[in-house]
């Protein structure tokens, strides 16, 4: 059941990130996910954005398979963390 919920969620979220938009104050804006490298003062020095050919929804099924089937719900090999604001 968890796998199905994740699969549906990531597919729908991916489709929205690929082609969805919001409209407010008569301006249409689209969501973008990016990553950055920051210096010691937290200023962005490099910004990494997806290429125009990348599609989140196409990765959804593979990512769910990777997590549930190949890694038995263990994503510990992906290093993450938080920095002080």
Image: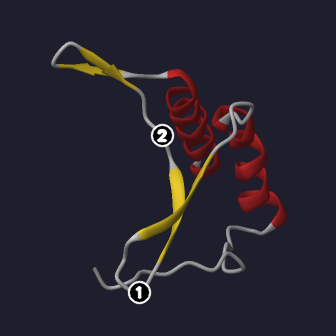
Residue drawn at x 45%, y 80% is 39
Q: Are marks 1 and 2 in contact (CB under 8 Å)?
A: no
Residue 67, percent across and down? Answer: 72, 61
Residue drawn at x 75%, y 68% is 72
Q: Nearer the viewer, mark 1 or mark 2?
A: 1
For the C terminus, the image quarter is bottom left
Q: Nearer the viewer, residue 3 or 19?
A: 19
**What residue is pinned by disc 2?**
32
* As drawn, 70 above or below 77: above
Residue 59, percent across and down? Answer: 73, 41
* As drawn, 20 above or below 3: above
Residue drawn at x 52%, y 33% is 17
Q: Nearer the viewer, residue 51 or 2?
A: 51
Q: Is residue 47 left or right of residue 43?
A: right
State which tag comes first along the sequence, 1 or 2.
2
Mark 1 surroundings: few (<14), some (14-19) or many (≥20) residues within 10 A: few
Between marks 1 and 2, how big is the CA–CA gap?
A: 25 Å
**What residue is pinned by disc 1?**
40
Label 1: which secondary element: loop
* As drawn, 53 above or below 40: above
Q: Is residue 23 left or right of residue 20?
A: left
Q: Quadrant of residue 5?
A: top right
């Amino acid at each position: 059941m968890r796998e199905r919920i994740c699969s549906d969620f990531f597919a729908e979220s991916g489709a929205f990130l690929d082609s969805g938009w919001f409209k407010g104050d008569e301006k249409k804006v689209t969501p973008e996910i990016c990553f950055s490298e920051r210096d010691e003062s937290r200023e962005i020095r490099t910004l990494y954005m997806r290429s125009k050919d990348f599609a989140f929804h196409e990765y959804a099924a593979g990512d769910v398979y990777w997590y549930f089937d190949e890694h038995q719900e263990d994503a510990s090999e992906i290093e993450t963390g938080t920095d002080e604001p």
